[in-house]
Image (cartoon, rainbow, N blue to C red):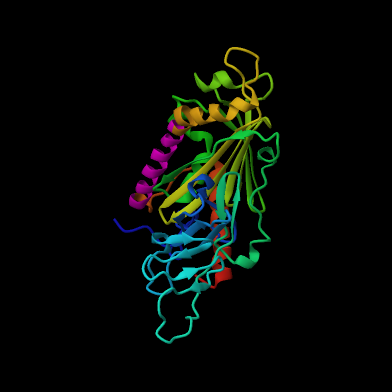
Amino acid sequence: MSAPPTFADARNRRQKARVAGLHPDYWYAVEHARALPRGRAVEVKFWNQSIALFRGDDGGVRALENRCAHRHLPLTLGSVEGCRLTCMYHGWSYDESGRLADVPHDRFGHPMPAVGLRAYPARVRYGLVWIFPGDPARATERRIPDIPELEGRDRWACVPLDFTWRAHHSLIVDNVSDFSHAWLHRKYRPFSDARLTRCEAIGDRVYVGYQTKVGRGKISGLFVDRRRVNTDAMDLCYEYPYQWSDTGGKIKHWCFFLPIDERTTRTFFLFYFESLRVPLTRVRIPRALMTPLLRVANRLLVAPLLRQDGAAVEAEQQAYETHHALPVPDLNPAVALFQQLTVRKWEEHLERAGGV
């Protein structure tokens, strides 16, 4: 069996979508903010690029190309000194711009080497660390998605969680937006009896609507206040390169995809709720109790549900690599629109970068 085709050699939309990258000129969530305390450096990857994240003594988050310009050791093997990232080997130290700021040993009469590293714009928002892996001049043009419900004193409860799956990001986009796979989740029933009511591409967005029964699980369904929220329909959108959903304006989520390489994706899920009820009553759960409740729900209900998705997309990745030449009779027209958008945006990047 031959290997799957490259993007340039792909013969159809599906094959192109399964090897396309995500356009780098967007902000990407790469790590939980809690995983990056002051004085720590961690490695993240964006489409095979190794990037060193670190938080300085001032609390600021920085991102640099993950190699020392001297012997090219990963800087994440080193240490954070003040607001600089220092190589473990010879102590060469870099500031947030990637400039070589200090060489602590004798330079044997040589001037400071005129070397530097690529620096990436980095920010913290919604409990996540974001970087801009593309043209830094465009970082101010693009925005991290605004989620007003997670801002201010009256913000809704949200406990982010993530998974790293051995699957291409386009498979995950299909999974989280195509509700024809309710059979996979028949134990948890996050949605059922879905009927497509909207399927429309507008610019860099694909809007999908379903008439469906939302949150009817034996346990999770007890917490949904159906007097206050319509759980018979859901709106979704592949807002490139992100995805979101909205149920009655009260139950929402975002997915943020990090394409680590051609067959590995880390996905950050943010589920957030305006309110939930005390089971079998009409009493709303106090806002102060929502966050600890969501932590428990993530562990006992949400994570097991999403692991089903992970197992499915990982199996589909392996299946694609074996059967990439065979046709796939997709019945949901939204899938074609997701793939068209993914391919078009990657072609835009390649054209801008002068690639093929």
The vertical placement of 260 against 161, above or below, is: below
The vertical placement of 48 against 105, above or below, is: above
Q: Main secondary structure of the magenta part?
A: helix
Instruction: Give percent across and percent down for residue 13.
Output: 50, 55
Choose top left, top right, bottom left or bottom right for residue 281: top right
The vertical placement of 310 against 43, above or below, is: above
Query: Which quarter of the figure is the N terminus placed in?
Result: bottom left
Instruction: Give percent across and percent down for residue 151.
Output: 68, 41
Q: Nearer the viewer, residue 157 or 114?
A: 114
Instruction: Give percent across and percent down for residue 265.
Output: 45, 50
Q: Residue at x 38, y 60 (%)?
A: 77
Residue, far top: 280
Asked if residue 241 lies in the magenta stretch, the reply is no
Instruction: Count the labels in the image.
Output: 0
Q: Nearer the viewer, residue 182 or 285?
A: 285
Choose top left, top right, bottom left or bottom right for residue 255: top right
Instruction: Give percent across and percent down for residue 56.
Output: 53, 57
Residue, far bottom: 109
Segment colored magenta: 304-322
Q: Residue at x 64, y 61 (%)?
A: 139
The vertical placement of 349 against 317, above or below, is: below
Residue 192 is at least partly visible in this image: no
Residue 50 is at least partly visible in this image: yes
Choose top left, top right, bottom left or bottom right for residue 26: bottom right
Residue, far left: 1
Asked if residue 311 lies in the magenta stretch, the reply is yes
